Image (cartoon, rainbow, N blue to C red):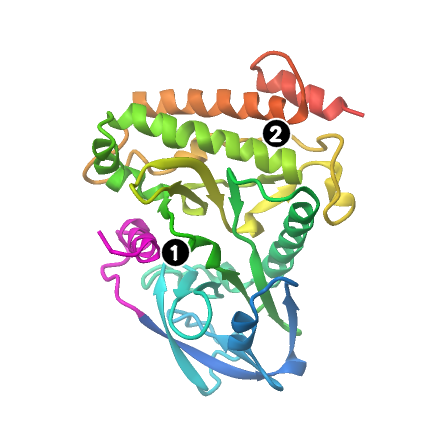
């Protein structure tokens, strides 16, 4: 195990994510284009660390990182001379982590037509709307937190900086990773099929029972809290966007981390104003249970079997409904359908 919790998180990310596409956990070089400020639109969160902002905003120029695998010349400034390079490490197909240099480490989500060397997806070059949405939801989350105070059981990693190239679909997002350097370990949920048995054994627990307690129920509660607190719901809450907080002894604390707010949407009337509380649900409740266990049955060494997944689904759903009722002060049955009707009809 790596000696530092943040280093261990990054190693878990690299080892488990898209193992079939990537064979190395080594760093790659990100080329940087120096773009005139007038050619881009910049949105910077009020609480963005100064050192992070200064990595990108340099006088009259803005540094625009380029995805190492992109081959599409329609991505703005893809052929511009490199003004510098940053070493970075992949954590998913479009997201890389930069940990060297001044300030806290950060994650970059970049436009590319090739998320992997042999896979072409031209739609992944179009990031302008994604940047706008992620920053809108991030501003809402920050405003709610300012109004209510933090929830220690629910940690939302918000985007801190978004840049869009005017007149194009090109853009990128920057997420401050400082919150992951609090001394805790953070296990990417998609790593559970790979390292989950070892962590359960460390706790002297059986794999299926341990992760029912440490993941299935907590992630159900976390989705309910996200909805109850912010009026937001994930569209595809898959294990790539979920982290499990562990203490220094690698014991789950019960806290869950969500990231990538571009994958959320308002399903309540809180959309009427940034940071506003909500009174009723305006769209279907969709906890998307199975999606949060995506590919858990495909790990090459120790997959979760179908019976285990079904038990986890049940624990997740019961936790989701019970927590949402508790958060909204509602008594009643464990039926998701009944709860949805009550929330939609609330005054």
Give the quarter of the image for residue 234: top right
Relative to 105, 281 lies left or right: right
The answer to whether residue 305 is seen in the rendering is: no
In this orientation, which residue lies closer to the viewer: 181 or 172?
A: 181
Relative to 96, 282 lies left or right: right
Residue 92, label in figure? 1
Give the quarter of the image for residue 173: bottom right
Name the residue at 67% across, 82% down. Answer: 38
Residue 315, label in figure? none
Name the residue at 63% across, 12% down. Answer: 332
Residue range corresponding to the magenta coloring: 1-27
In this orientation, which residue lies closer to the viewer: 160 or 23?
A: 160
Q: Is residue 300 above or below residue 333?
A: below
Please state, as top left, top right, bottom left or bottom right, where the C terminus lies in the image.
Answer: top right
Q: Give residue 295's position: percent from left, percent from top.
A: 34, 38
Q: Please, what secondary structure does the residue beneath circle 1 have? A: loop
Q: Is residue 228 magenta?
A: no
Identify the residue at the far top of this view. Answer: 333
Give the quarter of the image for residue 323: top right
In this figure, which residue is indicated by the disc labeled 2? 285
In this orientation, which residue lies closer to the viewer: 210 or 35?
A: 210
In this orientation, which residue lies closer to the viewer: 324 or 304?
A: 324
Mark before the other along the chain sequence, 2 or 1 = 1
């Amino acid at each position: 195990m790596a000696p530092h919790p943040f280093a261990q998180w990054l190693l878990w990310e690299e080892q488990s994510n898209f193992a079939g596409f990537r064979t190395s956990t080594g760093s790659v070089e990100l080329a940087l284009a120096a773009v005139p400020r007038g050619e881009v639109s910049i949105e910077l969160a009020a609480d963005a660390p100064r050192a992070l902002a200064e990595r990108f905003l340099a006088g009259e120029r803005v540094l625009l990182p380029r995805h190492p695998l992109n081959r599409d010349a329609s991505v703005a400034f893809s052929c511009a001379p490199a003004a510098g390079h940053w070493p970075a490490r992949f954590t998913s197909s479009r997201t890389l982590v930069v940990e060297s240099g001044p300030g806290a480490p950060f994650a970059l989500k970049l436009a590319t037509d090739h998320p992997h060397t042999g896979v072409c997806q031209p739609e992944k070059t179009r990031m302008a709307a994604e940047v706008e949405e992620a920053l809108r939801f991030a501003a809402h989350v920050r405003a709610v937190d300012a109004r209510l105070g933090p929830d220690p059981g629910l940690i939302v990693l918000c985007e801190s900086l978004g840049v869009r190239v005017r007149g194009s679909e090109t853009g990128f997002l920057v997420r401050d990773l400082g919150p992951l350097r609090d001394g805790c370990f953070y296990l990417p949920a998609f790593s559970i099929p790979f390292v989950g048995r070892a962590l359960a054994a460390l706790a002297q627990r059986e794999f299926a029972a341990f992760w029912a307690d440490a993941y299935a129920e907590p992630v159900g509660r976390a989705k309910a809290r996200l909805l109850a607190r912010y009026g937001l719901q994930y569209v595809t809450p898959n294990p790539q966007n979920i982290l499990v907080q562990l203490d220094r002894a690698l014991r789950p604390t019960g806290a869950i981390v969500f990231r990538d707010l571009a994958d959320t949407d308002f399903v309540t009337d809180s959309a009427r104003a940034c940071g506003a509380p909500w009174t009723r649900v305006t769209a279907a409740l969709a906890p998307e249970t199975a999606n949060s266990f995506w590919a858990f049955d495909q790990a090459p060494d120790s997959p979760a079997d179908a019976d285990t997944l079904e038990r986890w689904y049940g624990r997740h759903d019961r936790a989701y409904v019970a927590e949402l009722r508790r958060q909204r002060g509602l008594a009643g049955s464990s039926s998701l359908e009944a709860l949805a009707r009550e929330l939609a009809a609330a005054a």
